[in-house]
Image (cartoon, grey):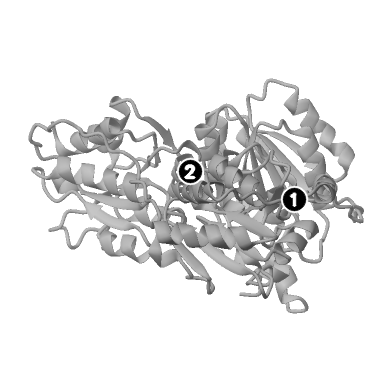
C-alpha cells in the first residue's frame, strides 16, 4: 500500500463522515482512497465552496469532515473557508497535498504549515512513510478531541512511497468531559439562589445541552436565550427569548437588559451577543461557563468564571440547589408568559411595510416565507446587510436547524454552507439566506447543488448592492458598491435550477408551486428587496 492510499483508508477507518474538495493531480490518489474505503466525496466547483461545505457538514452532523485539496493553489483557494472553520473550532481535517521538500522551485511551493498557523488551524503533516499511519491518527485525534481544524499536508514525493503494514486503527472518542471545581459550582449556585431576574445565554459550547440547561432554568426561574450560532436550542420552550444581541427582538432586549444575573453557557459573550455590552444592565452580575480557561473574561469583565462542560456544570449546580430545597419563580410568571407568547418573535412585531415600486420589504418577505416553508428546515446564512432577516424571521426546529458561519464575517460562504448543511441533514428542507453580492461570489457551486439534486431553497435578498457599505458610508460616493440589477432567476435557470422573481407577496405563489412539486432541483428566489435604510442590527454591527 502506498502512503496516499494509507492516509485515505486510515481517515475512513477513523470515522470521517464525508469528504469535499476539488481534485487535482496532487490529491487524486488520496481522494480515491477515501472513496474506495466508503467515504462519500462531493466534488465542488471551487475549493472555497468545498471548504464551506466541509465546515457546515461537520457542524450539523457532529462528525469530523475532510477537505481534499491540491497542493499550493488548491489550499490558497480554500483558505477563507478554512479560516472560518478554524475560528469556529470546527472538527475538520484538511488533507492538502504539498510540494516535495526538495522542489524549492515548484510553482506550487508555499509554506503550508505557516499558512495554516496564520489562520488559526493546527498545522500537521505526514513526515515519512514509516510515520504516515501514526501521523494520520494524530491529525484526526486533534480534530476530534480538541474541536480543531487541522491542515494536514501530504507531500507528493511521500505519497508514492510504500507504507509499512498499518496496525489496528484505534477508536477516537470525543472531547474528554470536564467537571467544574466543587467550590466554583457552589459559588455559581449561590449567585443563582440570590438572583431575582436570571437570564441564561447559551452559545456554541451549549449545542446539544438544552436538557440540562432547561432543568436548571426551571429551578432558578431563568429565561433562556442563545447567541446567534446556537439559535434554535430552546426553540419550543415557552421561556425562550430567542437570539441575544443584534438580532434581539425589542422584548428580548428589554428582558436581558433588566436581568440581575446573566450566565453565559459555552458563550463568548462577545460584542455581537451583548451589543458591545449595552445589552447587559449596569448592575447585572456576569458569569461565564466554558471548557477553555482562556475564554473566560476574554471579551468583558466577569464576576465568576467556571471552567467546565456546560452540561456537567448545569447538573452539578442543579444538585446543589435541589439539596438546599431552592425553587424560585425568578423572571417567570403568567404575565410575562403571555408577553413572550405574543411579542418575543420578530414575526409578531408589527412593521410598516415599505414594499412598492417593484420591490418587497425584506421583513414582509421573510415573515411570509416562514409561513410557507416546512417547519423541518435547516437554515444557512451568508453575511451582509440582509442577514438579520432570515436569522430572526425564519424559525428553526432546534440548534441543528441553523448554520451560522460568521466567525470571520466573510461574504460569499453561504452557498457552500447550505450545501454542506443539506448533506448533513437530508431529513430537512435546506434554506439559504444570501445577499446578491454573496450569491454572485459563490455562484459556481450552484451547479454542485443541481448535480446533487438538492431540494435547496436559495433566498436572495437582492438590493443590487453591498448593502452594508451603502448604509454605513451614507453620503459618500457609492458607485463602487452599487451594481446594475441582475435577473438572478434567469441565471439560476441556466444552471438547471427553478427560478422565481419576487417583487410582491403575490409572486410567492411560485414558491408554493415548487414546494408542492417533486423538488428535484434547487429553487432560487430572486427577491427584489426595498431599501431598508440600514437593517436594525447594522448600527450595532458597525460600532466595533
Name the residue carrying label 1.
Answer: 332
In this view of the protein, which residue sits in the foreground, 109 or 37? 37
Circle 2 or circle 1, nearest the eye: 1
Q: Residue at x 16, y 43 (%)?
A: 134
| Residue 330 at x, y percent in the picture | 70, 55
Q: Nearer the viewer, residue 389 or 276?
A: 276
Residue 403 image position (x, y, % from top left): 57, 45
Helix or strand or loop: what does disc 2 sit on? helix
Give the quadrant of residue 306: bottom left
Crowd band around label 2 with a 10 angstrom C-alpha radius: few (<14), some (14–19), many (20+): many
Percent position (x, y) of residue 430?
Answer: 62, 35
- Of mark 2 and mark 1, the one earlier in the sequence is 2
Q: Residues within 10 Å of mark 1 (few under 14, many from 20)?
A: some
Count of numbered badges drawn on the protein: 2
Question: Is residue 147 depicted above or below 493 in this figure?
Answer: below
Residue 444 makes an appearance in the image: no
As measured in the structure, the alpha-carbon distance from the residue carrying label 2 to the one carrying label 1 is 33 Å
Q: Which residue is mark 2?
A: 59
Amino acid at each position: 500500500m502506498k502512503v496516499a492510499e494509507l492516509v485515505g483508508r486510515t481517515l475512513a477507518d477513523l470515522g470521517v463522515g464525508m469528504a469535499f474538495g476539488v481534485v487535482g493531480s496532487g490529491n487524486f490518489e488520496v481522494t480515491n482512497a477515501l472513496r474506495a474505503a466508503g467515504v462519500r466525496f462531493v466534488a465542488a466547483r471551487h475549493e472555497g465552496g468545498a471548504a464551506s461545505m466541509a465546515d457546515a457538514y461537520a457542524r450539523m452532523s457532529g462528525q469530523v469532515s475532510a477537505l481534499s485539496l491540491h497542493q499550493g493553489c488548491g489550499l490558497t483557494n480554500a483558505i477563507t473557508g478554512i479560516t472560518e472553520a478554524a475560528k469556529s473550532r470546527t472538527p475538520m481535517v484538511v488533507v492538502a497535498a504539498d510540494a516535495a521538500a526538495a522542489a524549492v522551485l515548484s510553482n506550487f511551493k508555499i509554506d503550508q504549515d505557516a499558512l495554516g498557523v496564520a489562520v488559526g488551524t493546527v498545522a500537521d503533516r505526514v513526515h515519512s512513510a514509516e510515520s504516515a499511519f501514526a501521523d494520520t491518527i494524530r491529525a484526526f485525534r486533534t480534530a476530534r478531541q480538541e474541536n480543531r481544524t487541522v491542515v494536514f499536508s501530504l507531500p507528493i514525493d511521500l505519497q508514492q512511497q510504500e507504507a509499512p503494514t498499518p496496525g489496528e486503527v484505534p477508536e477516537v472518542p470525543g472531547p474528554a468531559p470536564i467537571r467544574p471545581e466543587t467550590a466554583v459550582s457552589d459559588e455559581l449556585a449561590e449567585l443563582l439562589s440570590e438572583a431575582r431576574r436570571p437570564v441564561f445565554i447559551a452559545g456554541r459550547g451549549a449545542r446539544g445541552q438544552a436538557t440540562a440547561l432547561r432543568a436548571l432554568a426551571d429551578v432558578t426561574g431563568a429565561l433562556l436565550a442563545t447567541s446567534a450560532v446556537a439559535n434554535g436550542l430552546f426553540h419550543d420552550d415557552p421561556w425562550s427569548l430567542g437570539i441575544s444581541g443584534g438580532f434581539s427582538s425589542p422584548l428580548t432586549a428589554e428582558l436581558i437588559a433588566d436581568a440581575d444575573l446573566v450566565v453565559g453557557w459555552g458563550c463568548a459573550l462577545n460584542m455581537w451577543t451583548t451589543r458591545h455590552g449595552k445589552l447587559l444592565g449596569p448592575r447585572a452580575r456576569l458569569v461565564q461557563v466554558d471548557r477553555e480557561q482562556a475564554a473566560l473574561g476574554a471579551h468583558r469583565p466577569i464576576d465568576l468564571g467556571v471552567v467546565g462542560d456546560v452540561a456537567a456544570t448545569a447538573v452539578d449546580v442543579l444538585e446543589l440547589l435541589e439539596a438546599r430545597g431552592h425553587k424560585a419563580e425568578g423572571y417567570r410568571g403568567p404575565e410575562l408568559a403571555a408577553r413572550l407568547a405574543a411579542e418575543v418573535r420578530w414575526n409578531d412585531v408589527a412593521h410598516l411595510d415599505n414594499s412598492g415600486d417593484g420591490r418587497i420589504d425584506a421583513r414582509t418577505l421573510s415573515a411570509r416565507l416562514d409561513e410557507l416553508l416546512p417547519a423541518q428546515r435547516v437554515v444557512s446564512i451568508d453575511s451582509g446587510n440582509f442577514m438579520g432577516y432570515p436569522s430572526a424571521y425564519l424559525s428553526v426546529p432546534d440548534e441543528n436547524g441553523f448554520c451560522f458561519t460568521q466567525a470571520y464575517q466573510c461574504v460569499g460562504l453561504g452557498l457552500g454552507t447550505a450545501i454542506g448543511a443539506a448533506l448533513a441533514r437530508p431529513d430537512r428542507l435546506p434554506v439559504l439566506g444570501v445577499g446578491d453580492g454573496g450569491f454572485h461570489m459563490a455562484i459556481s457551486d450552484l451547479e454542485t447543488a443541481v448535480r446533487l439534486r438538492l431540494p435547496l431553497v436559495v433566498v436572495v435578498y437582492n438590493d443590487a448592492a453591498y448593502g452594508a457599505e451603502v448604509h454605513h458610508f451614507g453620503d459618500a460616493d457609492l458607485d463602487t458598491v452599487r451594481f446594475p440589477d441582475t435577473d438572478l432567476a434567469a441565471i439560476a435557470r441556466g444552471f438547471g435550477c427553478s427560478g422565481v422573481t419576487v417583487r410582491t407577496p403575490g409572486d410567492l405563489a411560485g414558491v408554493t408551486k415548487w414546494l408542492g412539486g417533486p423538488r428535484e432541483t434547487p429553487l432560487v428566489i430572486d427577491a427584489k428587496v426595498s431599501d431598508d435604510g440600514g437593517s436594525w442590527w447594522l448600527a450595532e454591527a458597525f460600532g466595533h
